[in-house]
Image (cartoon, rainbow, N blue to C red):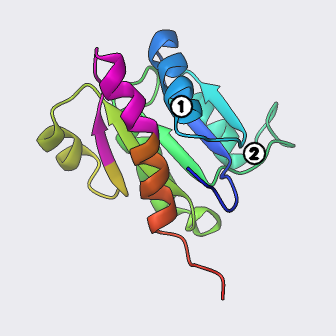
Amino acid sequence: MNLISAPNILIVEDNPLDAELTRWSLSEAGFKGQSFVVTDGLEAMAVLRRESPFQNHWVPDLVILDLNLKLMDGPEVLQFIRDTPDLSGTRVAILSSSPEYIMRTKAGKADCYFSKSSSLDVYASIGKKILECYFQHQAIPE
């Protein structure tokens, strides 16, 4: 994938293997930007609010969000993103093991939805689809 500018991606995933597979799938899709993994909803909120120890961390352009998280669930994180004017340009891709109808019900304000897979071939395609979702929502410079 030929990326004009790579987004900064926050991956919110409590399963270390799924987080690594997500990073791998982005790499397979040609992603060359920065990604950062947090393992629960409260840590995601600290990054998004730029609270200690993340006060100097970049604000993500794209959040890849699991729904079932410890301490604070994915829909709560998504609601915070949508309710915060400073994060209005942040895209959110849901990546969950929940069936898609559950994902859409719980996280109706996400930009796109993807199901986790145990197949590496399917997982490899997810990174490309997530990046396509991000770029289709971006304004094309004149």
Stretch in magenta: 113-127
**Left or right position of 107 against 50:** left
Above/below status of 124 relative to 62: above
Check residue 120 for magenta coloring.
yes
Task: Give the camera-side residue of 116 and 121.
Answer: 121
**Residue 28 disc label:** 1
Above/below status of 102 relative to 107: above
Tag 1: amino acid: Glu
Farthest-out residue, front: 2
Query: Which percent across, then down, holds residue 15?
Result: 46, 13
Do we see residue 112 in this rendering? Answer: yes
Tag 2 near tag 1, CB within 8 Å: no
**Residue 45 disc label:** none
Q: Residues within 10 Å of mark 2 (few under 14, many from 20)?
A: some
Find disc 2 in the rendering and name its residue: 50
Q: Residue at x 56, y 27 (%)?
A: 23
**Left or right position of 11 against 99:** right
Quarter of the picture containing the C terminus is bottom right
Q: Residue at x 46, y 61 (%)?
A: 82
**Left or right position of 117 against 8:** left
Mark before the other along the chain sequence, 2 or 1: 1
Q: CA distance from mark 2 to mark 1?
A: 30 Å
Tag 2: amino acid: Arg
Q: Residue at x 41, y 53 (%)?
A: 79
